[in-house]
């Protein structure tokens, strides 16, 4: 079975979500102008109640930036650090310190679990500094702003699709960066998450005797998410559902695929027991869709 790079290619077919929402002035970015200083408060006003009441204009840009770093890393005051990074950007636009402060805003906001605001800051950085050395990190932060919200299978999977799309961008556009390996690992986990949602729904239908609907869900896992950890159970559930409908050939073929790829899995033991109880054995039978999957997964004819 193919590894993560197969999954990265496959997601281009599976993903139907829209393009990631941009939030910068792309016309300004295209003309090479510096980012419009619309102000941090316009972007994350919902996260903070008011503007700072301290005048930081007496600070030199480097000193103010270093104060923001110290506030974040030493004092652990993330909220105040965000305010200070914003002040660097507001007071000293068009400078290297303003650019650094923007990506640090994205980091600090993410650390505060203000994921939408972090995404806005990261996207602004990418819009105006796409070729900068920290662009890979900004894209990685943007992907994390989706990824770190998909911890529960039962949640809306739109975030998972967005995470996959953003992680794919890191992998493909910044393959030599420090964030590519981590993005590939998270891509696999997010991909697994989508398969888990299909399994959850399939089990629901199976338990209620709606075998055709259950088969449709398990089929998606086997056909589209075969690199995930859910494939062995999906094949076993197909054996169960097809036997319940009296489709012996399909049940036996699902058992054969399971046996060839996951013979040590407890799901194979369960499938084998179901087949033998029905007087059958795992073997490729018929010409259904599972026969094609067998040729791909076992005989490698899809290569």
Image: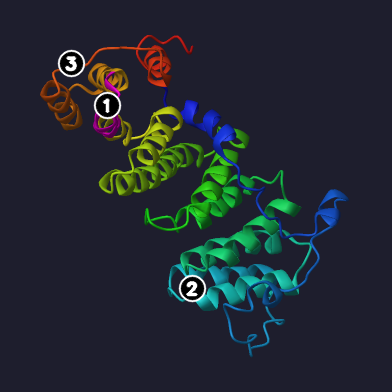
7, above or below 27, in the image: above
Q: Residue furthest right?
A: 31
291 or 279, which lies in front? 279
- Percent of width and height locating residue 98: 70, 64
Q: Name the residue located 27 percent from the left edge and 23 percent from the top edge.
A: 251
26 lies left or right of 144 = right
Q: Name the residue located 60 percent from the left edge and 75 percent from the top edge.
A: 84
Query: What secondary structure do most residues of the magenta stretch adopt?
Result: helix
254, above or below 200, in the image: above
On the image, which quarter does residue 1 sit in?
top left
Label 2 sits on residue: 78
14 lies left or right of 98 = left
Separation of marks 1 and 3 at Cα, in angstroms: 14 Å
25, above or below 66, in the image: above
Label 1 sits on residue: 246
Separation of marks 2 and 3 at Cα, in angstroms: 61 Å
**Disc assigned to residue 281:** 3
The stretch in magenta equals 237-248
Dot 3, crowdedness within 10 Å: few (<14), some or many (≥20)? some
Dot 1, crowdedness within 10 Å: few (<14), some or many (≥20)? few
Question: Do residues under tags 2 and 1 come within 8 Å of each other at their CB atoms?
Answer: no
């Amino acid at each position: 079975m193919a590894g993560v790079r197969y999954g990265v290619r496959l997601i281009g077919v599976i993903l139907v979500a829209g393009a990631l929402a941009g939030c910068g002035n792309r016309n300004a970015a295209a003309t090479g102008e510096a980012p419009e200083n619309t102000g941090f408060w316009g972007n994350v006003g919902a996260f903070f109640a008011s503007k700072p009441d301290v005048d930081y204009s007496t600070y030199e840009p480097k000193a103010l930036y270093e104060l923001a770093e110290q506030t974040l890393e030493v004092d652990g005051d993330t909220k105040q650090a965000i305010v200070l990074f914003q002040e660097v950007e507001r007071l000293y636009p068009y400078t290297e310190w303003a650019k650094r402060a923007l990506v640090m805003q994205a980091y600090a906001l993410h650390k505060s679990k203000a994921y939408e605001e972090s995404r806005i800051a990261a996207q602004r950085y990418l819009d105006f500094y796409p070729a900068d050395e920290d662009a890979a990190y900004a894209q990685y932060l943007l992907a994390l702003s989706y990824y770190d919200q998909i911890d529960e299978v039962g949640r809306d999977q739109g975030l998972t699709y967005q995470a996959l799309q953003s992680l794919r961008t890191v992998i493909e556009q910044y393959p030599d960066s420090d964030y590519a390996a981590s993005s590939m690992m998270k891509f696999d986990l997010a991909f697994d998450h989508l398969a888990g949602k299909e399994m959850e729904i399939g089990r629901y239908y199976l338990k209620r005797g709606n075998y055709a609907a259950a088969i449709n869900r398990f089929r998606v896992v086997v056909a589209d998410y075969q690199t995930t950890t859910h494939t062995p159970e999906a094949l076993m559930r197909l054996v169960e559902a097809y036997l319940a409908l009296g489709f012996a050939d399909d049940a036996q073929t699902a058992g054969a695929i399971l046996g060839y790829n996951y013979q040590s899995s407890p799901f194979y033991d369960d499938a084998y027991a179901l087949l033998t109880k029905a007087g059958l054995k795992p073997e490729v039978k018929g010409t259904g869709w599972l026969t094609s999957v067998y040729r791909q997964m076992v005989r490698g004819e899809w290569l």
